[in-house]
Image (cartoon, rainbow, N blue to C red):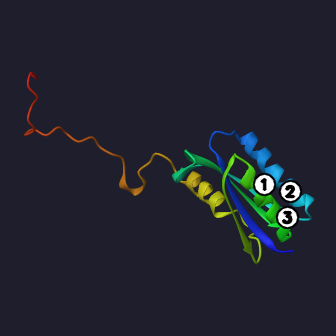
Amino acid sequence: MPLYEHVFMARQDISTAQMDALTDQFKAVITDNGGSIGRSEYWGLKPLTYRIRKNRKAHYALMNLDAPAPAVAEMERQMGLNEDVIRFMTIRVEEHEEDPSVQMRAGRERSDRPGGDRGDRGPRTPRPPREDAPKAEGAS
C-alpha cells in the first residue's frame, strides 16, 4: 500500500481533548477502509501566518498513513465536511521517517537552551545617567 504523511489544522477554540477525538475519528476512517496508522503526533496550538476563517491560531496534528487511496480520499472528504478542521494536506512519500518530526525536535531544542542568561556576553550592567541630558521642567 502507498505511504502518506497527513497534516491537518483544527480551530483554535477546541480543546486538546476534542483534538484527540478528531484524530481518533480520522484514524478510524483509515483503519475501517483497510489502512493503518504508523505514527501520530500532536504539534500543539501554533500561531498562523495569516488568518484562516477568523482564526489566528490552530491545533496541528501529523499522521503517518499506510492506506489505499480510497481510504485517504474518504478521510479527506470527511475533513472537508467537518467544521473544526480548517486546513489539511496529504503527501505521498516513499518511506516514513523513524525519528520525531521536525516540529517535535524544534521544541526539544529550544527547551535545551539555558533560559535567562546572556551567553558569552556577560551580565548586563546598568547605564549611568547622562549628565548633559535636559532635565524635565519642574524637576529639582
Report the quarter where the N terminus lies: bottom right
The answer to whether residue 105 is seen in the rendering is yes
Q: Secondary structure at mark 1?
A: helix
| Residue name at image x 83 percent, y 50 percent | 25
Q: CA distance from mark 2 to mark 1?
A: 9 Å
Rendered position, 129 above or below 107? above
Picture quadrant where residue 67 is located: bottom right
Rendered position, 104 above or below 5? above
Pick the front one: 128 or 135: 135
Report the quarter where the C terminus lies: top left
| Residue name at image x 44 percent, y 48 percent | 117
The amino acid type of the residue labelled 2 equals Val
Residue of label 1: 78
Q: CA distance from mark 2 to mark 3?
A: 7 Å
Residue of label 2: 29
Pick the front one: 109 or 13: 13
Q: Earlier in the sequence, mark 1 or mark 3?
A: 3
Whole-percent x, y for residue 87 in the image = 65, 56
Instruction: Categorize mark 1 by other alpha carbons within 10 Å: few (<14), some (14-19), many (20+).
Output: some
Determine whether label 2 and label 1 are within 8 Å by CB: yes
| Residue name at image x 19 percent, y 39 percent | 128
Determine whether label 1 and label 3 are within 8 Å by CB: no
Residue of label 3: 71
Left or right, residue 136 beside residue 16 = left
Q: Secondary structure at mark 2?
A: helix
The amino acid type of the residue labelled 3 equals Ala
